[in-house]
Each structure stands twice: as structure tokens, then as C-alpha cells.
Amino acid sequence: MRRRDFTALLGGAAASWPLVARAQHATPVVGFLYAGSPGPGMTSNVTAVFRRALAEAGYVEPQTVTIEFRYAEGQYDKLAELVADLVRRQVSVIVATPNLNAARAAQAATATIPILFMVSDDPAKLGLVASLNRPGGNATGVNYFLTELVAKRIELLRELLPRAAHFSLLVNPSATSAEPSTREATAAGSAIGVHVDPVYARDAREIEVAFTALAHNKTDALLVLPDTFFATIARGQIATLAARYAIPAIYTVREYVEAGGLMSYGPKLSESYRQLGLYTGRILHGAKPTDLPVVQSTKLEFVINLKTAKALGLEVPSTMLARADEVIE
């Protein structure tokens, strides 16, 4: 090679180095697909936990990472469109939460971008991963227990109301967990001699109609089944209606109780979002989803709102109060 040609080649390579360096150090983008609403309360709390965990992994927004949030606001049919936008943006990882609707939408949209899901049922049985220890494919995440605890919530209602014979379920038929949760609740009620009837609601108007029906049918108590729309957008409305119609109710997560609901038994969601943040950091550092086992969140909490119990004219047994992780007075 002639000296002039070598010098020109060297100069061209040197000119490209800054571009390569910039590409290698470009700020990664995390796509955060959330089936609920960006409103205050639960959503702001869990995203704060996620950000803190991501910072522990070395990624601080906006200096070293960008997070693109997409909210379905309880309209699950919007999830496909929202995740398609994240795929077009070529994000580094997609966090799909907090239900199976979001996880399935993400998996349908890409087989290459790493996906971190958060689902309430066994992801291996759902077909999201090959197994919990070796997920395979491009997805892994957190399995937090909601559906599996339906029977326990039925038992807690019966313990509070030992003479009750008729429980109702508030079900969002659009939720992928609706059918298995309803089936589990019906079987659990039958096992202890309680008749269980579902009522269905997809939006705020239908929730109003559902509570009118519950009051008319004189249900003894209500079990609100797992659903992102219920928990993030409608929880205040549901807790208020339960109080208005004097219906004792048990919920999936503590945020309902903080909004005035009677009691909840379920996972500590902050732990699940912390794990998602840590896993996101590991993927941004180069880990592959197939090498990250699905984490099963086992931290549960039982919360009672004693003020609401008194307003309903209920005396909570001392044994229940002693088992509660928190009693709101």
C-alpha cells in the first residue's frame, strides 16, 4: 500500500472514531409499558421505586438513561399500539407491567428486544417463558402472587363475617386473569359453604351499575378481583361505593385500603418493581433475559382499615388485627 493511501485510510478511520464512541456511549432508552394510568398514588410510587433500583444499577435518569413511559390507562386494546411505538423507537429494553395483557402485547410486538414482564400467574404455565429458571427467548421478569391468593381472601372475608352466605366478585372481563380468578374464587367459596356470584365492569359507568346491583341483591361481602384498571384508576371510586352501600370488601393490594377500603391481602408491589429496576440495569449492562431467572415475589401484606370497619359497624376479631401487617386507624 502506498504511503499516501495508508495516510488517507488512517485519516478516514480517525474521523469515524468520534462517531463510534458516541454510538457506544449513547444514552440507552428504556420503554416502560404500563397498563394503568399515570395518575398519582400507586403509579407514582412504583415508578419511583423502579427509578431508585435502576440508579442502584448505575443508570440515573436523565444523565445515563432515558425512560419512555407509555400508559394504556386501563384500555387494554391500546397496549399493542403503545408497544409498537416503543419498538419503532428501538428501545434497549421493554418493561411490560403490571399484568399479562401488557406482557402478551410486548411479546407479540418483538422477538429481539429484551422484555421484562410482571404477571400475577405462573409465567411458565402462561407460555411467557420456557421455565422459571431458564426463561429462554427474549423475556423474563417477576411473578407476583395475586390469583393464587383468591382463596385466602375468601377465607379472610368469612373469618370477618362468619354468618355470611353470599359473596360477590367484581370482575373486569377484559383482564386476562378474569376467568382463572373467577374460577378460583367460586371453588374456594364452595369449599366453605359460601355462594359466590360475579358482577362485571369494564369502566367507571359499569362499576356504578355493578354496585347498584350488589346493593339490590343484598350481597354479604365483596371480593374485588385482580385488575390494573380497578387498582390504578378506579380504586377510589370502588372504595367509595363500597362505603356508600355498606358492603364489606377485600382487595388485592394496600392502595385500596389507603383509599378507604376495608382490607387487603396481597403482594408488596414495591418489591416487584425494585426487582424490575435491578433486572433492567443488568440487561443494560449486557445480560440476556434467558440468563435471568424469573423472580417469584413472596412478600405479602395484610392491611386493615379499622376506621372503615367501624363505619360499617364491624368488629374485627383481635386474632385478625394481630396478624395484620398494618392497621389504619
Image: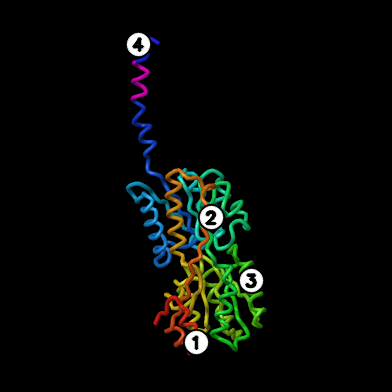
Residue 11, magenta (yes or no): yes
Residue 327 is at least partly visible in this image: yes
Quarter of the figure with the N terminus = top left
Separation (CA) of disc 2 from disc 3: 24 Å
Q: Which residue is drawn at 43% across and 59% down?
A: 274
- Mark 4 element type: helix
Is residue 124 a member of the stretch shown in magenta?
Answer: no
* N-terminal label among 3 and 4: 4
The residue to which callout 1 is attached is 317
Is residue 8 left or right of 118 when viewed as pictured? left
**Residue 248 vertical position relative to residue 202 in the rendered view, above or below:** below
Towards the viewer: 144 or 218: 144
Picture coordinates of residue 14 (x, y %)? Answer: 34, 24
Hey, which quadrant is residue 25 in on the image? top left
- Say what amino acid the circle numbered 2 marks: Val
**Which residue is the site of mark 3?**
184
Identify residue for label 4: 3
* Mark whose residue sits in front, 2 or 4: 2
Q: How far apart are marks 4 and 1 (CA)?
A: 91 Å
Marked residue nearer the N-terminal end (1 or 2) = 2
Number of residues whose C-alpha sits closer than 10 Å to that of mark 2, classed few (under 14), some (14–19) or many (20 or more): many
Viewer-proximal residue, 7 or 101? Answer: 7
Q: Which of marks 2 and 4 is nearer the N terminus?
A: 4
Disc on the earlier residue, 1 or 3: 3
**How far apart are labels 1 and 3 at the CA level?**
26 Å
Q: Quadrant of the C terminus?
A: bottom left
The residue pinned by badge 2 equals 294
Q: What element carries label 2?
A: loop
Determine whether label 4 and label 1 are within 8 Å by CB.
no
**What is the distance, in whole Å, between disc 2 and disc 4 at their CAs?**
57 Å
Query: Going 62% across and 75% down the picture, which residue do you hit?
Result: 198
- Residue 79's x, y, as percent? 53, 55
